[in-house]
Image: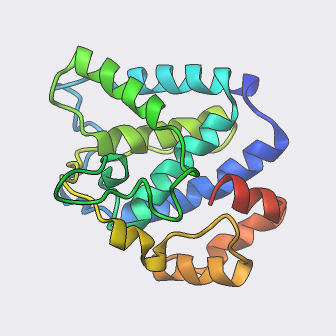
Amino acid sequence: MVDHFSSSSSSSMIMVVGLLVVLAQLKGSSSTHLSTDFYKKSCPKVFSIVKSVVKSAIREEKRMGASLLRLHFHDCFVQGCDASILLDDTSTFKGEKTAGGNNNSVRGYEVIDHIKLRVEEACPGIVSCTDIVAIAARDSVALLGGPKWKVPVGRRDSKTASLEAANSGVLPSPASNLTTLIQKFKDQGLSPTDLVALSGTPPARSVEDVV
């Protein structure tokens, strides 16, 4: 049950950032090929699998819900929602995991790996990591008492990542003040109005736990 996971502070925080993530997600994706029933025939159990793993992860550690949402948030802020944040360094590029706004800060990679493993067992080579991250973020919001929205799926994963792009200043830091946050959200097409909702959440908690 959703109520099992809810608390007043986490619900308030999750609802606010849930809105911001949805807006960032829409900005970073082309909607022409996306559909909520993209996997209806090819992988009909994907949504239930993701929810099951996320639910278990939050039951084990409630903070993981915010972490999964934050992971999606940081992925979308760098070159759009493409799962590039999940890529490890290779001989040809340095990934985003070690960027200043992500290193020793963004968590939840192991939960996404677990979901991917389960999904691959059900329908190999069908569902993108990008969609898994987006669905997991939505389920985290809902399970913690926030709103639930339909997730258009059908995105493809990026095959490369850019440490330079992630370190370009696009990612907000946990230490960012309100002025800095407003500017960074503005750079992503998000207005100060989106941040007004933060008035119901303690600012320090909002920035530290989510951004």
Extreme residue in the front direction = 91
Extreme residue in the top direction = 121
Which picture quadrant has residue 42?
Answer: top left
Does 77 appear above or below 5?
Answer: below
In this image, 23 relative to 160: left or right? right
In this image, 160 relative to 178: left or right? left
Which picture quadrant has residue 122?
Answer: top left
In percent of the image, x 56 and y 62: which residue is there?
20
Give the x, y percent position of residue 58.
Answer: 63, 27
Name the foreground residue: 73 vs 90: 90
Residue 47 visible within the image: no
Give the x, y percent position of residue 144.
Answer: 68, 36
Name the foreground residue: 79 vs 197: 79
In percent of the image, x 82 and y 46: which residue is there?
9
Assign the C terminus to one quadrant of the image: bottom right
Give the x, y percent position of residue 167.
Answer: 43, 72
The colour style of the image is rainbow
Residue 121 visible within the image: yes
Which picture quadrant has residue 140?
Answer: top right
Does 38 appear above or below 87?
Answer: above
